[in-house]
Structures are given as C-alpha cells and as structure tokens.
Amino acid sequence: MSYAETGQVNILVIDDDPDMLNFMAEVLIPEGYQVIGVSSAEKGLEQLPYQTFDIAFLDQKLPGMDGIVFGKYLLKNNPHMHIALVTGHSGPKLERMSREHHITYIEKPFKIEELLEVVDSYKAKIDAGQRHQKEVDATDYAPSFQPFFEHISDEYGLPEAPNRLQKLLFQHIRDLLGELSLSGRFTEEKRAMALSGLLAAQVFGMKLPRLKDGTTPWEAYDALMELHGKRKEFTQDEE
C-alpha cells in the first residue's frame, strides 16, 4: 500500500554497487522509511507485483538497462511514483532528459540531505493533495438559492402548473423529505432530488401545502439539512 493510504513511505533503491545500497539504506531506514535495495532493474521489476513503492532511487548505469529508461518505464506504469536518478555519469543531456520526464536528478557524490529532500518533497506533495481533496469533499453544494428564491417564479414567468402536476410534485417532495428524516436513510441522491423538486415548484410559482407540522416543504428541507450538518438553502437564521 502507498504512503497516501498508510502514512508509510516505501522506497526502492537500485544500484549495482553493494556499498552504495548499504549506504542509502543506512540513511533512509533510521528515518522510518521502508527500504528495499536490489542490484538491477530486472530484480526491481520482480519486486513490483508484491510491493507498492512511493519513491525509487535509480543508478544510471544498471546491468542491462539505463536508469533513465527504467525510470520512464516505472512512471508510465506507476504515475504516482517519484523517481530520482542517482548517477556518477553526469552531463547536461542526461540532466535535461531527467527534467523532461519529471525525474529528480542527483549527482554522485551527493549529500545525505539531497536524498532526504526527495522524500520530504514527495510527502509534502501527497499531504497537500490529500488536504486539498478533503477541502473539496467538505465543500457544500453551491450556490445558495436563498438570496434569489423569492423572485425565481417572477423571472421565469411560466403559466400556472395544472393542479394534478402540483399534487404529484408535492407528494414526491413530501416522500423524499420523509426519507431524509429517517436515521440512516439520508443520501446525496435523495437530497438532490428533493432540492430539485423544491426549485421546480418555485420556478412554476406553486403554492405547495404545508406539512403536518405546519412548516412549508422548503422550511422542512432546510431543517433537515441543518440536522444533517448541511447548508440551508431557502431560509435564513433569525438574528
């Protein structure tokens, strides 16, 4: 599972130099990261069916395949993975290719901080994305109709709807409000249907009957939204 799901960063390190593998593991593991080190791209591929990696540090000169080529393959099949090319074979062309493919470029010899910065940047990006998604999920439906509600029917100027249509719409809205009032029966689909019916009634200028408790269907809708922690649409709080 990924860092976004568990909070645990999983790192793949590929380098055919055992000393470099050991060094990078000694840097990353004490930071609390899960690290798997292998000596070739082929052995790295063998890990993929069993492990989800958030970050891969790849040496450029790998047996059988260059790191940049393997990095492009990983990104194609794992678009959320962050790839860092760690190489002693530096050059402007390789650096440019890395940048074009959104691969972090690190030259050997490197500072420990450069490795840790890759992980910190990845975590910050994922954390920011999750915060943004929570904000989007928490954003209530918009816009609020309250400021325009009284004038909707005037703006449309539609002829009065037949009594039969008004009765059918009222029955449907009443049934939906009843469903929304039941514990565990509230759904966004029912909410959207009730809201649509209430707006349709206002567009046609319908004078819907009051409910048994004496409230209008619009007032009952807002009371239910307040109960469920949603935004009211048709009424204002008394000051």
Image: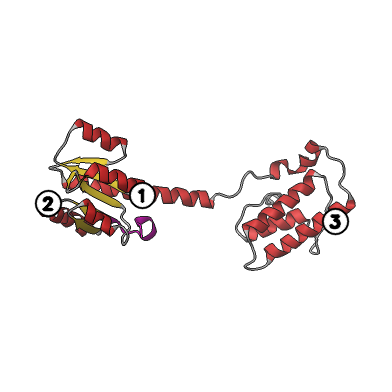
Q: Earlier in the sequence, mark 1 or mark 2?
A: 2
User: In the image, what residue occupies the spot 77% across and 58% down?
Assistant: 172
Answer left or right for 136 relative to 233: left
Q: Which residue is mark 1?
A: 77
Toward the viewer: 65 or 113? 65
Could you say which quadrant of the image residue 91 lies in?
top left
Toward the viewer: 157 or 77? 77
Give me the C-alpha separation between circle 1 and circle 2.
26 Å
Q: Earlier in the sequence, mark 3 or mark 2?
A: 2
User: In the image, what residue occupies the spot 11% across and 55% down?
Assistant: 18
- Element type where label 1 sits in the image: helix
Could you say which quadrant of the image residue 107 lies in?
top left
Q: Position of residue 192 (x, y in %)?
A: 67, 53
User: In the image, what residue occupies the spot 31% across and 62% down?
Assistant: 50
Labels 1 and 3 touching (C-beta < 8 A): no
Residue 17 circle label: 2
Could you say which quadrant of the image residue 168 lies in?
bottom right
Q: Which residue is mark 3?
A: 167
Q: Position of residue 102 (x, y in %)?
A: 31, 39
Q: Could you tell me the amino acid type at mark 2? A: Asp
Q: Could you tell me the amino acid type at mark 3? A: Lys
Give me the C-alpha separation between circle 3 and circle 2.
80 Å
Q: Farthest residue in the bottom direction? A: 183
Answer left or right for 120 relative to 174: left
Q: Magenta span covers which residues?
A: 1-10
Residue 119 forms part of the magenta stretch: no
Q: Could you tell me the amino acid type at mark 1? A: Asn
Q: Earlier in the sequence, mark 1 or mark 3?
A: 1
Label 3, residues with CA under 10 Å away: few <14, some 14-19, many ≥20:
some
